[in-house]
């Protein structure tokens, strides 16, 4: 899907989840937030679900030396909600959830396979994902790394902010269960541009959370 949307100010979103989530790769700290503008990701942000101690999963001997089943992470399967009112323009379901990798020993071979995932395009990078358009002219919100077979909506369907769309997973370019959120001007990913985003606080104010900040939604 192309778009005629021209950004003038940040697109304000609701948090697409409930509970405690740790912020990573925030555009509040740098742009491009993920070190690249590829795939319209210049202003993307990641949220890692955590427990009351701020952990994505309890530490064990295995977590220091081996990969871990996605199911041991506290956020695997947490509901993912629509951050906006809009229309679903595309979905991809069925991409496998990987084992989690918190050990440096398991991260090295994972990083060596980065090029293969990039060459696979949206399936390799975003994994199971949903794209929602705010209007026919855009912009478009991508929710990525969703749990396999958890997508509950179809292209052409109107969704409301707060409606459950899927579940948090570990598909695509992901080392542990988390949610990647970005706003772009097109789903022609090879030429898409990132669009600035912000989130609405309970107080009504809007802001972009910093890296390592924990959001309690």
Image (cartoon, rainbow, N blue to C red):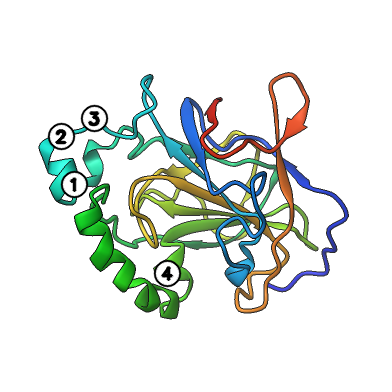
> Mark 4, mark 1: which one is toward the viewer?
1
The crowding category of the residue bearing disc 4, from other C-alpha atoms within 10 Å (few below 14, some 14 to 19, many at least 20), is many
Q: Which residue is mark 3?
A: 58
Structural distance between the alpha carbons of marks 2 and 1: 10 Å
Splitting the image into 4 quarters, where does residue 55 fall?
top left
Q: Residue at x 22, y 37 (%)?
A: 72
Evaluate if marks 4 and 1 touch, with contact meaning CB atoms under 8 Å apart. no
Evaluate if marks 3 and 2 touch, with contact meaning CB atoms under 8 Å apart. yes
Q: Earlier in the sequence, mark 4 or mark 2?
A: 2
Q: Which residue is mark 4?
A: 123
Q: Earlier in the sequence, mark 2 or mark 1?
A: 2
Q: Position of residue 142 (x, y in %)?
A: 58, 56
Task: Classify residue 56 as left or right of residue 212.
Answer: left
Q: Earlier in the sequence, mark 3 or mark 4?
A: 3
Which numbered marker is on residue 68? 1
The one nearer the camera, 21 or 150, is 21
Q: Earlier in the sequence, mark 4 or mark 1?
A: 1
Which numbered marker is on residue 60? 2
Structural distance between the alpha carbons of marks 1 and 3: 11 Å
Which quadrant: the C terminus?
Answer: top right
Q: Residue at x 47, y 75 (%)?
A: 121
The crowding category of the residue bearing disc 2, from other C-alpha atoms within 10 Å (few below 14, some 14 to 19, many at least 20), is few
Callout 3: helix, strand or loop?
loop
């Amino acid at each position: 899907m192309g778009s005629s949307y021209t950004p003038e100010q940040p697109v304000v979103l609701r948090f697409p989840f409930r509970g405690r989530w740790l912020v990573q790769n925030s555009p509040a700290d740098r742009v491009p937030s993920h070190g690249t503008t590829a795939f319209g990701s210049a202003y993307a942000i990641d949220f890692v679900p955590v427990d009351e101690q701020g952990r994505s999963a309890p530490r064990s001997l295995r977590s220091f030396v081996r990969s871990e089943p996605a199911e041991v992470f506290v956020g695997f399967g947490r509901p993912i909600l629509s951050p906006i009112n809009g229309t679903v323009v595309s979905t991809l379901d069925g991409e496998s959830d990987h084992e989690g990798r918190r050990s440096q020993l398991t991260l090295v071979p994972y990083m060596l396979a980065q090029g293969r995932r990039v060459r696979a395009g949206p399936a390799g990078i975003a994994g199971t994902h949903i794209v929602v358009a705010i209007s026919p002219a855009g912009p478009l919100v991508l929710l990525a790394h969703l749990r396999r077979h958890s997508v509950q909506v179809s292209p052409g369907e109107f969704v409301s902010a707060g409606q459950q769309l899927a579940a948090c997973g570990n598909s695509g370019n992901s080392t542990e269960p988390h949610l990647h959120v970005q706003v772009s001007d097109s789903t022609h990913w090879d030429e898409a541009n990132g669009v600035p985003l912000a989130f609405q606080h309970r107080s009504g104010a809007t802001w972009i959370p910093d890296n390592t900040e924990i959001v309690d939604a």
